[in-house]
Image (cartoon, rainbow, N blue to C red):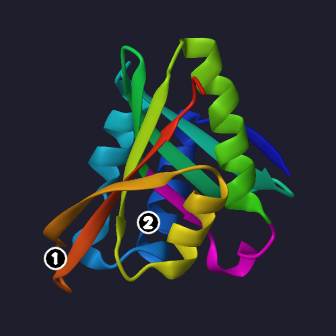
Amino acid sequence: MIIRGMKESDIMPLYALEEQCFCPSDRWSMADIRKAYELEHFFVLVAEEAEEICGYCIVYAVMDSADIGKIAVATKARGKGIAGNLLEHLWKVCAERGIKDVILEVRASNDAARCLYTKYGFETISLRKDYYKEPMEHGLTMQKNLSE
């Protein structure tokens, strides 16, 4: 498996993973993914195995802070450590860019994601009531300080 930066030809495969991995109210549109590719404050990491995209991480960075907007792994590729590999690669990219803090939001009921993030050093810093729609659910804001 390789982790690399996004190419323009990845837009459609990433959108297909959006449809597979997220409920309709949480999905990004193809236009949103294209903007993440084109805008300078975003960077996108892509996990590829056997020339097939199996995961990705979309990050918005400003100054010394980054926000993980999306992290997804194809259903058939789960349990192989892909999300962890994406996060480990993200730490390297953040170090290169001088990023000191990374935050994200996660559904309160998403135990698998919360366990992953905790394993990789994130701590819950706040509750966002009714943050998610369809189904309505609280979100948790989690943060990892990279300068420690």
Q: CA distance from mark 2 to mark 1?
A: 16 Å
Identity, as a three-letter code, of the amino acid under mark 1 = Lys
Q: Secondary structure at mark 1?
A: loop
Choose mark 2 or mark 1, whichever is in front: 1
Sooner in the amino-acid sequence: mark 2 or mark 1? 2
Q: Residue at left 46%, top 37%?
A: 102
Position of residue 79 measured from the top left corner of the image (x, y, whole percent):
76, 76
Q: Is residue 79 magenta?
A: yes
Check disc 2 and report its element: helix, strand or loop: helix
Q: Residue at x 74, y 60 (%)?
A: 82
Above or below: residue 64 compared with residue 119: above
Compare residues 63 and 140 and report the one nearer the observer.
140
Task: Say left or right for 96 vs 11.
Answer: right
Residue under pointer 2 = 18
What is the span of residues highlighted in magenta in the rendered image? Answer: 70-80
Q: Is residue 110 above or below residue 88?
A: below
Q: Which mark is residue 133?
A: 1
Are the two marked residues, 2 and 1, in contact with CB atoms closer than 8 angstroms? no
> Does residue 65 show up?
yes
In the depicted structure, whether residue 40 falls above or below residue 90: above
Q: Identity of the amino acid at label 2?
A: Glu
Quarter in which the C terminus is drawn: top right
Q: Position of residue 113 (x, y in %)?
A: 53, 70
